[in-house]
Amino acid sequence: MKRKVVISLLLCGMLMASSAEAQKIKFGRYFEDATLRIKYQRVGSKKSDTIRMVQQDRIGQWSGSLTQLIDPFNNGFFRIVVQDAQTGRRLYSRGYNSLFAEYRDTPTGADSVAAFEEVVRVPWPKVPVNISWEELGSDHRYHTQYTLYCDPLQLMEQLLKRSAISVSLDPIRLHYKGDVHRKIDVVIVPEGYGPADTAKMRTDMERFCTYLLQQEPFASRRNDFNVWGVALTGEESGITNPGKGLYVKSLVGASFNTFGADRYMMTMKLFQLHDAIGSTPCDHIIIMANSDTYGGGGIYNFYAMSSLNKMAYMVLPHELGHSIGGLADEYVDEDLSYGETHSKSFEPMEPNITSLVEFGMKWESMLPPGTPVPTPENASVPRTENGPLGVYEGAGYQSKGLFRPAQHCMMRDYAPFCPVCAKRLNAVFDLYTK
Ligand SMILES: [Zn+2]
């Protein structure tokens, strides 16, 4: 009996905490309509991970929502959390991944320490706040790694002393549908364009804007997007490709052959990338790489990149599945499966793959009655409104023990996004627009 009371008290406490969290935070009470951009380094390996602060800046308007400040998705190896320093109340949070999280799972990252640039953007606080960097632990909970105390008046004084309030060039409005607080603002950053390439750059940006908006569920939500272009060039044309001995002085330092994979094109120069974006309204970043070679990459709430190869109209939506939706790859590639990339003994955090350990957290409720779990490849499954849905083995690079929602999907083989992926993308879009 006593035990029962304790449990119900605990439950009551949990409910109170969650309803307090759900109470709307009044943006104007805690934040100004401006962006605090924080540059830092993440230094470490599989064995360690340390945050080193580099620089804070005040840039442009806040482009995110004024009403949805707490991240509802438990997705991302990392999370940034802003709390009122006086009361501890959580005011803003966002999950994200980074290139470091991939590096530490490579053979080199097992014990060799490397430094990675990272940048986060949060709304500019009106009151003193604690900004915390959290990391997902092996217990599948977020733990605080580093906390930055930020008094906005003191910070403003420091910025005025170093005259660091920057003014950027006017961005190009490629697709403008209104108030940045109610739209998903995507910035296209041109990479690998030299001073003589400005006309081509403009045409390519229009093309990329079309690729961004033409696939479902993006197409139905096109009025929820603003797409901006940054009109900057680097010193030289082309993209660095160490495999071919090609090194280019480009705008944001992108390169093929990231972690030894030919087609994996990423940049380590996050500070340059964010300097190029400046005060352009920015919820998500696309790096458009001036190369005909097949390649790209995408990391959740970090950036997406694609070359101009003839497959770009498919590569770009796939990479946006990672960078905006936080979706996992649904294909099998044992070479990419470094050890515990996706452990099979617990549920991976991405919504579109499951180890069946806690399938109820995933798309179980979307399955039509009678669907076999797992679903054999040749089983006939009832069609759902948004296409066939099952639980197929082979996902997250691994052929066994991980399952995906459909035979085909943008995250597997460039087919249309499966119902589970489309649902999550729509839920993420709502976070910026509703
Ligand atoms: Zn999918």
Image: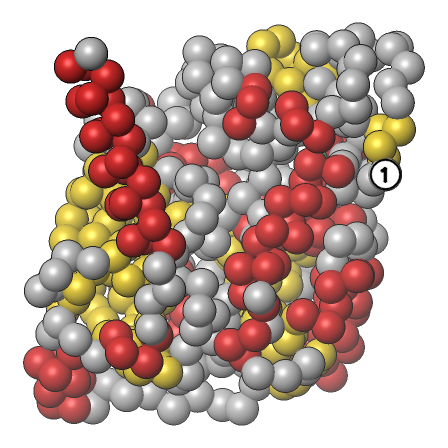
Q: Is residue 303 left or right of residue 164?
A: right
Task: Evaluate whether residue 244 shows in this view.
Answer: no
Q: Residue at x 68, y 82 (%)?
A: 176
Q: Residue at x 76, y 42 (%)?
A: 417
Residue 421 image-quadrant placement: top right
Q: Is residue 311 left or right of residue 351?
A: right
Q: Position of residue 144 (x, y in %)?
A: 19, 42
- Residue furthest front in the image: 1
Q: Tag 1's secondary structure?
A: loop
**Can you say which quadrant of the picture contains the C terminus?**
bottom right
Residue highlighted by disc 1: 385
Q: Is label 1 within 8 A of ligand 1 (CB to nearest ligand atom)?
A: no
Residue 208 image-quadrant placement: bottom right
Q: Position of residue 113 (x, y in %)?
A: 23, 35
Of the pair 130 and 202, the residue shown nearer to us: 130
Q: How is the image coloured?
A: secondary structure
Image vertical order of residue 164 relative to residue 142, above or below: below
Neighbourhood count class around disc 1 (C-alpha, 10 Å): few under 14, some 14–19, many 20 upward: few
Q: Residue at x 38, y 23 (%)?
A: 107
Image vertical order of residue 280 relative to residue 140, above or below: below
Q: Is residue 203 left or right of residue 40?
A: right
Q: Position of residue 40 (x, y in %)?
A: 25, 58
Task: Evaluate whether residue 98 shows in this view.
Answer: yes
Q: Position of residue 365 (x, y in %)?
A: 66, 27
Image vertical order of residue 404 relative to residue 315, above or below: above
Q: What's under tag 1, amino acid-wise? A: Glu
Of the pair 25 and 219, the residue shown nearer to us: 25
Of the pair 94 and 385, the residue shown nearer to us: 385
Q: How many marks?
A: 1
Of the pair 271 and 50, the residue shown nearer to us: 50
**Can you say which quadrant of the picture contains the N terminus?**
top left
Q: Residue at x 70, y 53 (%)?
A: 316
